[in-house]
Structures are given as structure tokens and as C-alpha cells.
Image (tube, rainbow, N blue to C red):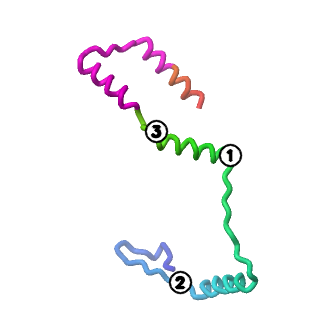
Amino acid sequence: MASIDSLRSGQVMTNLRNSSSTNTTQGRTEAREESGHTPKDAVSLSSQARAVGQIHQQLATEPSFDRTKVEAIKNAINNGSYQIDADRLANNILRFEDELRGL
């Protein structure tokens, strides 16, 4: 294979295979076939990983926001009846900041 130092911009890179490494790999494959042993891959997930997967599936099936609530807020803003509770908003911002500090 070409070394990275010898590559130039705009040149086509050719993929060269070393015949000795191919033969070595083939030899290992043939040896496995003769011995009757074929390695098998296995994956196991922890209970936490399974729980995260279940949560992910649940979230994927649920809508990302409540359309009815969004429409109600839009309508309230459009007709001028939307009221902002400044104290409640400030408390929620402070609570959010406290949660971020705990991370």
C-alpha cells in the first residue's frame, strides 16, 4: 500500500494487496476448516443496556411534543390572552440551572 507521505493531491490511490498476507489468511481459514472449529461471535447486553434500549423504543413511538398544548398556546398568543407568570418562569430557570450544576 502507498505510504501517506507519498500521496499527492489529485492522484488516484491504488489499492495494492500483499500476496503473502493473503496466503497467510487463507492458510488460517483452511486450518480452521480442517479442524472443524469455526469461531462464533457473541454479544451480550447488560441489564442497563437493555433498559436503555427499551426506553429508546418507547421514546421513538411517542410524539416529541404535545400538539394540542402547542396549538392552545399559539391561539392564546394570537388572541392576546397568553399570560406569563414571571415568578414561575424565574423559579423554573433557577431550578434548571441547579439541575445543570448537579451533572
Q: Please tell me how crowded label 2 is: few (under 14), some (14-19), or many (20+) other residues with Cα within 10 Å.
A: few
For label 1, the crowd category at 10 Å Cα-Cα, with few meaning under 14, some 14 to 19 and many 20 or more, is few
The quarter holding residue 86 reads top left
Q: CA distance from mark 1 to mark 3?
A: 23 Å
Indicate the position of residue 48 as horizontal and vertical percent values.
66, 44
Say the numbered circle drawn on residue 61: none
Front residue of this view, candidates 76 and 84 = 76
| Mark 2 or mark 3: whose residue is earlier in sequence | 2
Provide the secondary structure element on which disc 3 rests: loop
Give the image location of residue 98, x and y in percent: 55, 23
Residue pictured at 25% horizontal, 15% vertical: 80
In the picture shown, does residue 87 fall above or below 22? above
The local secondary structure at tag 1 comes to: helix
Q: Residue at x 52, y 20 (%)?
A: 95
Give the number of the disc on residue 62. 3
User: What's the amino acid at mark 1?
Assistant: Ser
Circles 2 and 1, Cβ within 8 Å, touching? The answer is no
Question: Measured from the top left, where is residue 30 in percent x and y?
Answer: 68, 86
**Residue type marked 2:** Arg
* Tag of residue 47: 1
Q: Which residues are magenta?
A: 66-94
Q: Are marks 2 and 3 in contact (CB under 8 Å)?
A: no
Residue under pointer 2: 17
Q: Amino acid at mark 3?
A: Glu
Q: Compared with residue 89, is residue 8 higher up or lower down, i.e. above or below?
A: below
Q: Nearer the viewer, mark 2 or mark 1?
A: 1
Relative height, residue 9 to residue 65 (above, below):
below
Q: Is residue 78 left or right of residue 87?
A: left
Nearest to the eye among marks 1 and 3: give it. 3
Q: Residue drawn 67% across and 66% down?
A: 41
Location of residue 44 by image quarter: bottom right
Q: Is residue 9 magenta?
A: no
